[in-house]
Amino acid sequence: MGTQTAAEGVQFPVSDGHGRSTTAAGRRVLADAARAADPTLAARIEEVRDWRSGYVDALRALSEAPRPEIPAAGLRALHERLVHVRGGEERPLRDAVALPPARTPATEEVRGEGERVRELALPVDGELLRGDALLRRLGDWVARGVLEPGCAAAVAEVSRHPEWLALEGRRILLLGAGAEMGPLEPLAAWGADVLAVDLPSQAGRIRALARAGAGTVRMPGDGADLLTSLPELRAWIGEHDPGAGLVVASHVYADGGAHVLLAAAADALVADLPQAAYAALATPTDCYLVPEDAVREARRRWEHRGVRRVLQAPLRAASAGRLLRPAYSGSAGGRGLADGLVPQQGPNYALAKRVQRWRAAQAAAEGRAVSFNLAPATTTRSVMRHRLLAAAYAGARHFGVQVFAPATTRVLMAALLVRDLHRAAPADAEERLAETAAHGGLWRIPYELRSALQLAALAGLPRSLLRGT
């Protein structure tokens, strides 16, 4: 969606004379978020020396006792600390969208040439599941702990209401429209009205998906960089804002610090469109308070490991208990914290996803319609480029985790988006997230994720290497 190639556009602030530091900015934003609810935690975050590993404990602590003050404080810190640079003048990000645009991009409109898809069909393992076959698969996933029951119920409701699919009366603004996990392909096939924003390099993909679909897709010229063209994109959106029917869906992604900048730039647009609904995807590699039933199931599986208990004992002993720790071992009862943070993904990825989570919570508290659902682990190109994660995904099935293909995830999560826009969501976005999570089994396996990650990678390494050949 954007890369930082010059000292223009959305930037990290200069930190203590050491340049534009992603580490310093990320730590300060999280500390500012914590300070609104727990000054002691804020001080602890500020004192972390090795941020590359220490951010995990910081985010875990922020997740253990969520407070309504945290999202607003985190977003405020993000918009005050990050900056926007234009013509050598630097200002806080919060002021960037109000800048006069250098020019408003022209609009390219692409009308779909395909036949409109009028029923929900989920691609799974080379099949298109619809009707009773889809309901059976959803039931199987719930029985195996792959989806939370609320997720299956929501998708089943969309299957019973195919007239919802076109999202008539809505206009969907997709930021990062060409993203592999984004909903452009199914939305276009269902006949939706879409504003597609992404880099020029994604313009060809967007056009192809739009033509293959049956809706209308508008894009700014040959694409636009959200980081360097924020005022121009805000002006362009203003020309196509229908008012009450606008939905802003953030699917931006980039490697490293650019991911944080993109998430922040997208959030600046969301903040400046206070009447719009908000949509984004939560990542499975974060921390969440999960339903009591998930905790009980994980503990039941731990107690009923059978012969695995004996086979795993030497590994647990040799690692001094660091490998294959029981899930939710620190929970006294009731809901537990599923800690799916993967240090190898890094603090920038974690902060970018937390920004979207904060916005979902804040938008829900403001009374906006919100669609914020947990997507399963998916074999996207960005994941498969990471050797450890690619191997861990290949070996995940040995630990009770199902990894989804991108085509399946796209339609599954688009169906949840459709459902959310037709049903009033509760004011607590976190509660809703827990009810409809498509976590792929991560919340119900008997092990803490990080204690099994290396073993999953070892188990999946041969399969991963074969895929890479």
Image: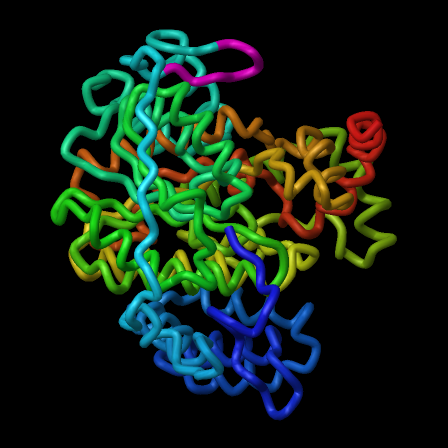
Q: Is residue 395 left or right of residue 293?
A: right
Q: Quadrant of residue 96?
A: bottom left
Quadrant holding the C terminus:
top right
Identify the residue at image location x=48%, y=30%. Answer: 409
Which of these two is toward me, 49 or 302? 49
Identify the residue at image location x=31%, y=71%. Answer: 72
Q: Is residue 153 left or right of residue 223?
A: left
Question: Is residue 368 shown above or below 258?
Answer: above
Q: Is residue 114 magenta?
A: no
Q: Quadrant of residue 215?
A: top left
Q: Position of residue 429 (x, y in %)?
A: 29, 52
Q: Position of residue 104 (x, y in %)?
A: 30, 56
Q: Give, as a single range, the part of the protein colored magenta.
A: 121-127
Which of these two is toward me, 393 or 294? 393
Q: Position of residue 371 (x, y in %)?
A: 30, 44
Question: Is residue 160 shown above or below 74?
Answer: above
